[in-house]
């Protein structure tokens, strides 16, 4: 078999390219395009540690909206079933620099490997390219894989990830919810006769996005581009649902969820704070859990939370979700504070005062540079 042509330091449009890893004892590392190499979808479906964020549909949405080209590193030669992989995107930005992220806008992304040795070989290929000046830094977002002390990465961000085991009965799950903060508010929402709608229609998307603008302003950050959610709807199909709670005809809360083979993933949530006392968000979570149970799903991934956002952490734990430490890692070590997210915290007050239309325009411009 003819070896794929490669140019050192450049990403290729071919589905597969190879490069020699200089310090890995002769291990050859291959780079493939997961959107066109049919082995990727098969590999992800066979890995218990794969998540929504490894799926072709998620990678396709990232490319469609932000132009990020997904790539996979593996030591598996062309023509053989994949045995290991790290998936990543290159973020090219004139504002924030060129860097590798595994993966942009993804809460977590586990390296799909079987040993620490495989992990070192794949990471070494990336770090050598950083050392040659191709990228500013590499960031990986593993959950369960412990970093080897011999790998010269440093923690850049610390989060919590919350997961709710859905295997107990619906009655047992409800009893485990916090009585005042969850059970009582769900019953309040039901008494208020809040209307529940779900789907992915343009009407529901507009309800969701208007609430998102309100929520992001309260948080002092711009909303994600509307096109990002349209890309997700287009790519994810029926596995994506926008869920909206309405008081009369007024949308009061909304969440966006994506279902996987065995998991339900909560990705985005927003609300009109004037109606928080009605318990709309609580009702949406409860309906989501009930649906996931009815469909035989085993886990509800409630997503990441900043460790200092005690309100959000407490909210998730009131549902009985398990807290897991989630660390993001970067190379080189001096890149820990070099990310674009550090600059945003200094302009939160400005974002909180910007009118809707300019705020949306700022989000559409900035997010592709954040990654």
Image (cartoon, rainbow, N blue to C red):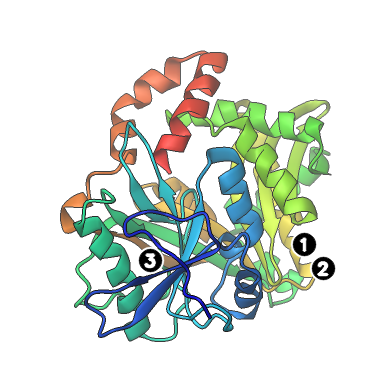
- At x 82% / y 42%, what residue is drawn? 196
Residue with the mark numbered 2: 294
Q: CA distance from mark 1 to mark 2?
A: 6 Å
Q: Nearer the viewer, residue 52 or 254?
A: 52
User: Which percent across, then down, holds residue 12?
Assistant: 46, 56
Report if the CB atoms under discs 1 and 2 are less than 8 Å apart.
yes
Element at label 2:
helix
Q: Nearer the viewer, residue 248 or 305?
A: 305
Residue with the mark numbered 3: 325
Res. 177 in view: yes
- At x 75% / y 49%, what residue is drawn? 241
Residue with the mark numbered 1: 290
Element at label 3:
strand
- In the picture, residue 205 is in which quadrant? top right
Above or below 143: residue 330: above
- At x 35% / y 73%, what residue is drawn? 122
Q: Earlier in the sequence, mark 3 or mark 1?
A: 1
**Tag in front: 3 or 1:** 3
Q: Nearer the viewer, residue 113 or 226?
A: 113
Q: CA distance from mark 3 to mark 2?
A: 29 Å
Q: CA distance from mark 3 to mark 1?
A: 27 Å
Element at label 1:
helix
């Amino acid at each position: 078999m003819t070896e794929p042509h490669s140019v050192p330091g450049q990403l290729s449009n071919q589905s597969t390219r190879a490069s020699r890893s200089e310090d890995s004892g002769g291990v050859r590392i291959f780079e493939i395009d997961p959107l066109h190499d049919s082995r990727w979808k098969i590999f992800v479906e066979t890995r218990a540690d794969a998540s929504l964020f490894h799926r072709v549909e998620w990678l396709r949405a990232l490319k469609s909206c932000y132009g990020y080209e997904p790539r996979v590193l593996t030591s598996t030669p062309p023509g053989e079933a994949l045995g290991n992989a790290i998936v990543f995107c290159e973020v090219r930005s004139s504002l924030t620099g060129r860097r590798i992220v595994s993966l942009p806008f993804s809460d977590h992304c586990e390296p799909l490997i079987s040993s620490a040795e495989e992990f070192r070989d794949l990471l070494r290929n990336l770090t050598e390219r950083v050392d040659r000046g191709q990228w500013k830094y590499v960031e990986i977002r593993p959950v369960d894989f412990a970093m080897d002390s011999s790998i010269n990465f440093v923690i850049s961000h610390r989060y919590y990830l919350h997961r709710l085991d859905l295997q107990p009965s619906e009655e047992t799950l409800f009893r485990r919810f916090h009585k005042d903060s969850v059970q009582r508010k769900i019953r309040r929402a039901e008494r208020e006769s809040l209307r529940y709608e779900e789907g992915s229609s343009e009407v529901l998307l507009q309800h969701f996005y208007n609430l998102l603008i309100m929520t992001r302003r309260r948080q002092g950050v711009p909303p994600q581009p509307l096109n990002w959610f349209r890309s997700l709807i287009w790519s994810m199909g029926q596995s994506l649902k926008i869920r909206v709670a309405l008081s009369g005809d007024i949308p009061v809360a909304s969440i966006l969820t994506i279902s996987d083979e065995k998991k339900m993933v909560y990705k985005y949530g927003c609300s009109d704070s004037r109606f928080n006392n009605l318990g709309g968000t609580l009702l949406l979570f409860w309906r989501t859990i009930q649906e996931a149970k009815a469909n035989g799903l085993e886990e509800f991934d409630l997503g990441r939370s900043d460790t200092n956002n005690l309100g959000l952490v407490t909210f998730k734990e009131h549902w009985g979700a398990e807290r897991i430490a989630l660390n993001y890692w970067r190379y080189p070590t001096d890149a820990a504070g070099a990310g674009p997210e550090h600059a945003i915290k200094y302009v939160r007050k400005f974002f909180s005062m910007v009118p809707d239309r300019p705020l949306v325009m700022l989000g559409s411009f900035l997010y592709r540079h954040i990654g």
